[in-house]
Image: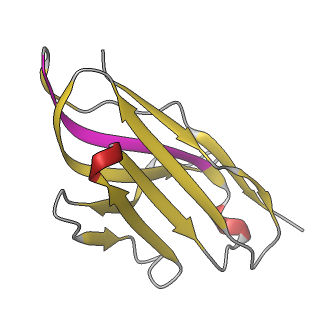
Amino acid sequence: QVQLQESGGGLVQPGGSLRLSCAASGSIFSINDMAWYRQAPGKQRELVAIISNTGAPHYAESVKGRFTISRDNAKNTVYLEMNSLKPEDTAIYYCNAAINSRYQGLIYPWGQGTQVTVSS
């Protein structure tokens, strides 16, 4: 069984920084794209950033220049460095990945989510 486990959320003041991590584990053959989504109260889940298996990143306009997505393929881990945080970045952040599982084929599991709160 393949699982994604996020960590690194918390409470931070406006203008502050946080780093999220998401590690994939289980029967993994390979991982294609890895991504971060977020969902604020009363809003739909939205894509924040995505990175290909070759390291090419893409960002939502709202986070460009402030967030950086990266990955460590040897560790099956994706990171999200968040700087200059704003109150509107407050949300639950979810990790998602396109994983070639040894026994289930291509699957798109989600992590359990980690809360990020930006408030003074």
Q: Is residue 34 left or right of residue 81?
A: left
Residue 88 visible in image? yes
Q: Is residue 72 left or right of residue 53?
A: right
Residue 9 picture location, percent across and down? 67, 49
Q: Which of the colour schemes (rainbow, by chain, secondary structure, one colour) is used?
A: secondary structure
Q: Where is the C terminus found, in terms of image quarters?
A: bottom right
Residue 21 picture location, percent across and down? 51, 50
How many numbered circles does the render carry?
0
- The residue depicted at 39 percent of the width and 70 percent of the height is 60
- The residue depicted at 78 percent of the width and 74 percent of the height is 14
Q: Where is the N terminus found, in terms of image quarters?
A: top left
Residue found farthest to the left:
105
- The residue depicted at 20 percent of the width and 35 percent of the height is 99
Residue 31 picture location, percent across and down? 19, 42
Q: Is residue 6 left or right of residue 27?
A: right
Secondary structure of the magenta portion, mostly?
A: strand
Residue found farthest to the right:
120
Q: Nearer the viewer, residue 45 or 104?
A: 104
Residue 3, compared with residue 119, is above or below; it is above
Classify residue 88 by image quadrant.
bottom right
Residue 44 visible in image? no
Residue found farthest to the front:
74
Residue 35 picture location, percent across and down? 34, 52
- The residue depicted at 29 percent of the width and 48 percent of the height is 74
Q: Which residues are magenta?
A: 92-102
Residue 102, compared with residue 20, is above or below; it is above
Q: Is residue 45 magenta?
A: no
Q: Is residue 98 magenta?
A: yes
Classify residue 75 by image quadrant.
top left
